[in-house]
Amino acid sequence: MAAIAGPAINKMSKISRRDLLQFIGAGGVGVAGGILYGEGVQRNVEFLIPQVVPPEDYSPGVATWYNTVCNQCSAGCGISVRIREGKAKKIEGNPVHPVSQGRLCARGQAGLNVLYNPDRIRTPLQNAAQRGSGNYAEISWDEALTTLGSRIGRLKIEGKAGRVRLLTGRTRGHLDELFAQFMGLLGSEHYQQYDFTYPAAIRAANRISFGVDQLPYYDIKHADFLLSFGADYLGTWLSPVHHSLAYGHLRQGRQGRRGKTVQIEPRMSLSGAAADEWIAARPGTEGLLALGIAHALVNAGNYLGSDRDEWSIALEAYSPSTVSAETDVSEESIVRLATEFSAPGTSLAIAGGATAAGTNAVASVVAVNALNYLAGNLGQRGGVIFNSDPAFSATAGSRQAGLRGMLDLVEAMEAGDVEVLLVHDTNPVYALPENVRFRRAMENVPLIVALSSFHDETTAMADFILPTNTYLESWGDDVPDPGVGFPVASISQPVVAKLYDTLAVGDIILLLARRIGGELPIRLHWATMEEFIKERWREEYELRSAAGEDQDFEAFWRASLEAGVWGQPGAATGDESVPSSSSMIASITDPVSKFAGSESDYPFVLHPYLTATFTDGRGANLPWLQELPDPMTSVVYGSWAELNPVTADELGIREGDILEVESPAGSIRVPALIFPAIRPGVIAIPIGQGHSAYGRYASDRGVNPIHIVATQVDDQSGDLAWAATRVRIKRTGERLRIIKTDGVTRTLGRQILGPKNDHA
Amino acid sequence: MSTIVEKLRQYSKPGYYDKFDYHWTMTIDLDRCTGCEACVVACQAENNLPIVGEERFAENREIKWIRIERYWEGEYPDIKMGFIPMLCQQCDDAPCETACPVYATYHNQDGLNTQIYNRCIGTRTCAVYCPYEVRYFNWFTYTWDEPLEQQLNPDVTVREKGVMEKCTFCIQRIRIAKDNAKDDNRRRVRDGEVVPACVQSCPTEALVFGNSNDPEAKVSKMMKSPRGYKVLEELHTTPSIVYLTKVQS
């Protein structure tokens, strides 16, 4: 066991954690006591003489780099943060981290806008008026924690601890364990997570297909032929930075061998723009298309497994001609894709986006998995490589509530079964359809506590707001999901002293445990999150050190902190997968998504899509991302609805005409944008804007298409089928100028993109 | 007199800098570029580009030293999107340089087209002359909502109203690398020692930067690709950026 160490380490100054803490304590940034005790004593004298006795680590003009983990999406990229004079100046990828490998996306770099966001919550707040009015009064940590501790403690004594619920986003690592322990000791089994972008269907499908509960490593880097069903792997799917690195290699990283990519989706995404071939199959039939390709593959005799006959029978109904009629993809294309997919060389099929968000989501992903199985891509370089059990936090994914879990929660809240709701790092009021009525159900909860850095829509309903440190000010750890094919764990450390009277969320839980009393403070005895994490890492270290380890724990800990990551690159991948063709075959049912709303009343399919900048709306409060032109349309600061030019012509719609987009579940008003790469009959609206709260950069800007999605559940995963709603559109007669940077979007004979050629 | 004329003749010839140590060059492989715009944010962070706000954006007054241009080709369903990162091409025969009445923009011995903010009087002539439209004018003195200003890079000036600005190839990073080389008693910086923010961030490694005077540098090798071309070459601006076309299959 050795920390992945490399050239990046000499980027960092050789200082110990103690020095850093001294620096945090004395470095003139203030709030010294707060880190340890949470009382947040501000010693003003430190502001007056900040540099008379400069701290050890402080040399003006010299930059230090600290490695930590990005928390802007769930990929878990390692990052290096450049610090000068105690301030964070730049975020770059951590070169020794196997996920990001020194690279980083737009959103990861905008992490500085999270840290220095002017709209951060700076002190604990208590609701001073009507709930939701945004009228809060500042209180002290002591007061807030004592009040909450006694309320929750009383419920525990009365045996009503089950009426306390904890809802978080996608918490991983030991923070997840701390939450679970806290709730367990309290006597409540209601610890759930809700993340709109969580790949529930992919996980469920992989359980069925391969018998594993881990996301596998999709080895795009070594593939020769990549077939993506709706997965925007370069923008939003699972681990975009890592996939982008892989994509670069697939294209130009191998001498004389250029991989080909094909993208199947109704509206061109970043990955569709990068693809050699973009196929706009009829929405909701992508799984069926995969079965058609599978049929052609087996029929052509390219699958030689012993269960060949079973597959032939199972796929009999999905001949290319039948599938062609349903999917609107030519028979010739289907057969050709099957040939290319089973050609010599490595091939890989992936599924995500709208394909994994229909009412048939799991069935569709299983069909794509079947393609990988039939082409012999499982466990192969350039194919699907199974991850071993992660170093820790194996259970985090199972806490994802999905739509079904959230509906249960809403029901419980409406029935008055929830006395206390603790919310952290999730915004269900925004990221659930309005029909779920999450906000209204919250009104029935007597006490809502938000552990949050920003006033988002869900936080706005809280009675108490406990302001949290951002990820750049917190201790934590993480196991990237999906993994990279070998065991990896990253450490997250504070890179700057915290700016305000806030606390890390783990520290809040530990302090709260102390106020609740009973066995909680005895079992959760750690003074801080840092102590807790270090102890857990020590246990992990001791477990593994039997395998021949020569450095002591302190040295190992320091090396891991410097590198920001620990991993075993050589370790064998855990191949506990048992591809089960019988269960895959059994799952080949219901291959077409069922849309809410009839085609006659609602002629268009609504295609909400995630953007690389805002994803599920969390990035909307970052000014750099608001000012970043959308990659496909160049629009900034707002929402738009994309229409095919022919459709727009027929309906007499021009860019900027405000449309009323109405689904069976509700309606929104949004300006039209003519987009040449979208299937006629589809209306695409980006997710992310349309916040009613969330600070000055996000609020009252654009619309949120999730709100008009019909509440349909994919039965097998229990998750929201957010790509299965039909809509109708109406011109309102009003117009709005869409702000975008694009002028002329054709090259008009100028060779701006270079002369045509076919050099590989 | 004759020596001055000689020098003028010599210096007005493209490639005169060959005898200097560096000629900073970039290659951009469009077959790798996915248009993700990581470079755009990286540049914004590194070079203290202002947040101009919605209103200013609507007036086309945004400031982005590097941007992604998009070009459609074909019609649905046979439609393709081509992305091309566009930034100052650091032209050897830069039209902007000849235009400036106060010599605020000039060519330095590293082959960089540099902008001296203190000299600029804001005639905006250079922006008119630039065929790549990569020069940006500060119509206002922009401010940062407190405490966003804490992020500002102390190695880079914050510009104010009336000044033209543009990509510098992250000259502050070049300076630091040169200083380090000097401290190590090396005459030149090593290949890969200078990495501008956009190149550093690029998740597909589409951007490569280096000294094209060094035949062993990665960038020199990339420039020799048969896919290489320069944008608007026909204008004889002699750009320092070589693009590699996307492979059409």
Image (cartoon, grey):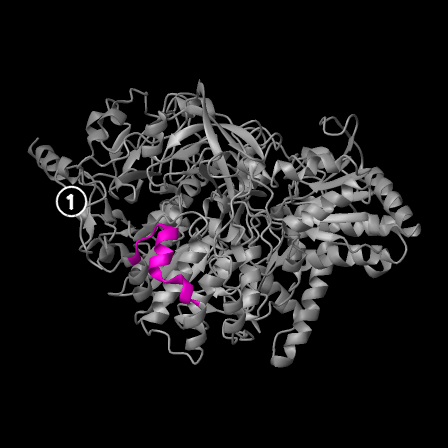
Q: Is residue A75 left or right of residue A471?
A: left
- Residue identified by numbered label 1: B15
Label 1 marks which chain's residue? B
Rendering quarter of residue A318: bottom left
Residue A347 lies in the magenta stretch:
no
Across and down, in percent, residue A186 comes to: 84, 54
* Residue depicted at 41% across the width and 27% down the height: A739
Answer whether residue A331 is visible to the viewer in this image. Answer: yes
* Magenta segment: A315-331
Q: Hey, which residue is sitting farthest right in the picture?
A: A158
**Viewer-proximal residue, A748 or A468?**
A748
Across and down, in percent, residue A84 comes to: 54, 44
Q: Amino acid at mark 1?
A: Gly
Quarter of the picture holding the N terminus of chain B: top left
Answer whether residue A504 is visible to the viewer in this image. Answer: no
Q: Residues within 10 Å of mark 1 (few under 14, many from 20)?
A: some
* Residue depicted at 35% across the width and 50% down the height: A328
Dominant SS in magenta = helix
- Position of residue A53 relative to residue B183, above or below, is above
* Residue depicted at 73% across the width and 59% down the height: A532
**Viewer-proximal residue, A449 or A519?**
A449
Rendering quarter of residue B146: top right
Q: Is residue B203 left or right of residue A35?
A: left
